Image (cartoon, grey):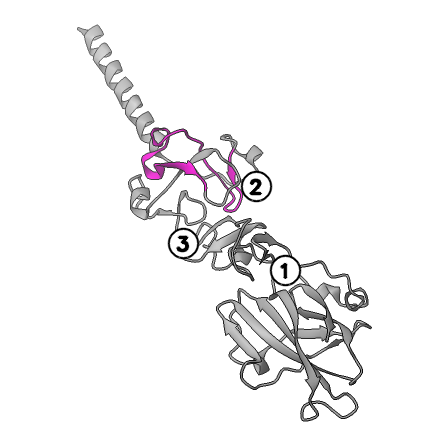
Amino acid sequence: MQLRKMMVMLAALSSMSLALTACGDDATTVDSCTSDTDCSSGFCNTTAGVCMETCESAADCPDSEKECAVLAGSSKTQKVCQCKTDELCKTDDSSTLVCGTVSKRCEEPGSGPAACTKDADCGAGNTCNTTTGECSPAATTCTGEGKATCSYGNACYSGTCSAPPTPTCENYQNFGNKAALGTTGPIIFKVATTSAANDTNFCPASEPKRVKITISAYSDTAWPATSAELSGFFYVLVNGTPRAPSISSSTGNYTVSGNRADIVANLCVASTSSTVSLGYYFTGGNFACHQANY
């Protein structure tokens, strides 16, 4: 009789142990990481700095992170377990967990990195989907011009995303404040000579020829309403000296469309002048060389 009672108790304890193990299988532990070697699973979501469990199908994942898919924005092809909704994260023993927009793990509110709002929030070679707040690899092909679907700092040239031309002009070589340049400010992707004609109403008699140069750029930051409000925009002389460009306030000299601005800058030169080397840049942006022939 005593032996039978003991056997029943052992069976009950065994069942309880199995139940606890089953509950534990659905729990999610978020470990921080900076590389794949930091994770026992061998997969680090480096954007969020958290380890993720690899999987072949949803059956390999806990109920709270039942999505088994390739991580958006990652160059890795391995599928990982991901959360989909805040509600599913609350199926575990916590009622406060939410689905991290960047981590794709169930996490405490505010504990994960914020969703992206612009490309600068994402790693190199990634773009920000401002609707979902997710970073994803930038396209390598594109249509049109300007930023298009390219990563910030690149532009669309002949259907391919690439960096703007590398500056090699004397204006750039002699420019002494290269620390003011970068890839986070407005990006100049095109400079073109628009026209050249004598205009003594605009230019002095000693330099009567008015040359119009159109600078096209894009920015993640909203452009100001008028050209007079532009800041950090310069043209650079051959000797490397930066100057504020002359922009007429009349219609058509400053046009903004979405993240793109087309700015017409003026230059007064001698009547016999037929070419000039120019450089343009925005603070924090790239340096664009332009040989204006007219």
| Label 3: element kind | loop
| Label 2: element kind | loop
Magenta residues span: 43-71
The kind of residue on which mark 2 rests is: Thr
The kind of residue on which mark 3 rests is: Thr
Residue wearing tag 3 = 132
Give the residue displayed 74% in from the left and 64% down from the top. 178
Indicate which disc residue 40 carries: none
Residue wearing tag 2 = 34
* As drawn, 217 above or below 19: below
In the rendered image, residue 49, in percent from the top left (x then y), is placed at 52, 44
Give the residue displayed 28% in from the left and 25% down from the top. 19
Cα distance between the residues tagged 3 and 1: 24 Å
In the rendered image, residue 21, in percent from the top left (x then y), is placed at 33, 26
Q: In this view, does 251 lie to the left or right of 11?
A: right
Query: How busy is the neighbourhood of tag 3: few (under 14 within 10 Å), some, or many (20 plus)?
Result: few
Work out whether mark 2 precedes mark 3 in sequence or the reverse, and give the earlier one: 2
Cα distance between the residues tagged 2 and 3: 24 Å
- The answer to whether residue 212 shows anywhere in this view is no
In the rendered image, residue 266, in percent from the top left (x then y), is placed at 67, 81
Work out whether mark 2 precedes mark 1 in sequence or the reverse, and give the earlier one: 2
